[in-house]
Amino acid sequence: MGLAPGDCLLIARPTDWSFIDCWLGAVTAGALPVAVAPGAGMGAARAQSARVEALVERLDARFALTSEAFRDLAGANAAHRTAEIARTFEEVTAATPARLDAVPSAPEATAFLQLTSGSTGHQRAVEISNRAALHNALAFDEAIREPLGAAPGDRPRWTVSWLPLNHDLGLVGGLIQSLVVGRNLCLLPSHAFLLRPELWLEQIAARGSVVSYSPNFALNTCVERLAETPGGELDLSSLRALICGAEMIRADTIAAFEDRLTPMGLRPAAVRPGYGLAEATVAVTVDGKGQGVRTRRLPGGFDRALGIDEVVCTGRPVRDTEVRIAGPDGRAKEDDGIGEVEVRGPGLFSGYFRDPEATRESFTADGWLRTGDLAFLHGGELYLTGRRKDLLIIRGQNFMPEEFEWIAESVGGGGGTLRAGAFSVARDRAGEQAVLVVEVAEREESERALLAAEIRDRVGRTLSLTLGDLVLVRRGRIPKTTSGKVRRGALRRMYLEGELGEDRPPG
């Protein structure tokens, strides 16, 4: 079809074998595939067609691999360039020769593009080299095997994943790592997990010696959905390691997950927190001690009584990777000093595609990647505390948005299917004030009033702070990334522009 080395190919398809065929085919041809989340439903597809159109323009994509329905919808919603370059899997298959010769590619050449989460701004495409992809897959696998005592020839035999292939943990941790280290791969569509999380557990139980991955919210989804399911009907002893990452990790969520699944044979300490980002291919740190989830109190003046006073250890850096914590002056902090996470190592990206200015701004003068994440180190292990750009500064005091969100979710029963999002807005002379948006299920007006009062009271008692505003919205209204992170910047914009469809509680 004329796709040439260096051309960008957008793949906006659900997780299936056609996705893998075209992604690997593009790499083989020397082109640059970039995985994009497909629209999940009519409304979601409309919004996604606009996002894909913006990416097509920004990346100057040659083709976009979509469904016929998505192509038609793009045209109907003025995403004209997307509609013009869109091709279906059937069209690509019909034009593919029986034999496809691989284009030679150097270790430092870009193998594929990977989108950032876009949780604090628009998505950028990071360039991942062959060397970075291979090194990170091997280093990640080594970190997974470390507490298992497994030699290179005794790796876990299966990866079972429901994470979409447009997510870095699904693509690199699932597909690429399985190819590189020789693991069998079982993929479930993401919507199948969200509808029936027990399908994920059934696939784990059906295979021997399994590695899997999950964000924090998905563990909570399992606990909520399996609440009425009797224990012991599945044997999960085959799950050797469950790497938890992609968003802030809550110790209480993991504890609830372990309590619920231990009667099903879940191994002690099988859940292993980790930390990574698209700009580092995926993995930066993994808890390799195999001692279960470990926490530490926030250092200094960050203690919050019942708020975020304990944070989870995400382990040591993977092989050949360095992590340091930098203060506002750029100097490295000692143990227990909170600052910005900076990373250096062979798994780092080569740069943002066609954005040299953003690339330069992301690195320090001595070659460290500025991640924008906040954390502290203790004994060489990383404890993530939040994200610098999401900080709420209220009356001169720093608050993590997760502090408000976790309080609301604990009151409202969220964290799985329902979420909360917090941000700050300027209120004239009053300065910055905290706004909390909470998804709720259908409730009577009196129930909503009680829920709102409890959230306000809990925030006040826990954080010694009065909310500037509290908005209740219907389920699914809060914008999220493909990994389930709340897109707080987009949520703030929707709030300010009156687009939330808000259901303001009485009082």
Image (spheres, helix red, strand yellow):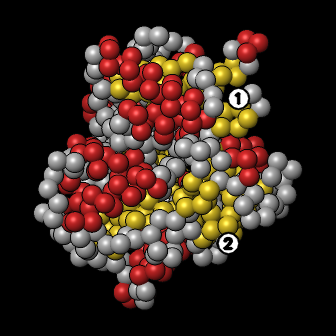
Count of numbered circles in the view: 2
Residue 427: image x %, image y %? 69, 14
In front here: 380 or 90? 380
* Mark 2: few/some/many CA within 10 Å (<14, 14-19, 20+): few
Q: Say whether residue 41 is left or right of residue 151.
A: left
Residue at horizontal 57%, vertical 29%? 460
Q: Secondary structure at mark 1?
A: strand
Residue shown at the point (26%, 61%) measured from the top left: 261
Image location (x, y in percent) of residue 227: 22, 48
Q: Residue 394, which numbered label?
A: 1
Asked if the residue at tag 1 contacts the one at tag 2, i.e. Cβ–Cβ closer than 8 Å, the answer is no
Quarter where residue 183 is shown: bottom left
Amino acid type shown at disc 2: Gly
Q: Nearer the viewer, residue 22 or 302?
A: 302
Please determine whether, in this image, residue 12 is positioned above or below residue 451.
Answer: below
Q: Is residue 136 above or below residue 150?
A: above
Residue 424 drawn at (x, y percent): 63, 26
Q: Is residue 349 above or below residue 240?
A: above
Q: Which residue is mark 2?
A: 379
| Residue 483 in sight in this render | yes
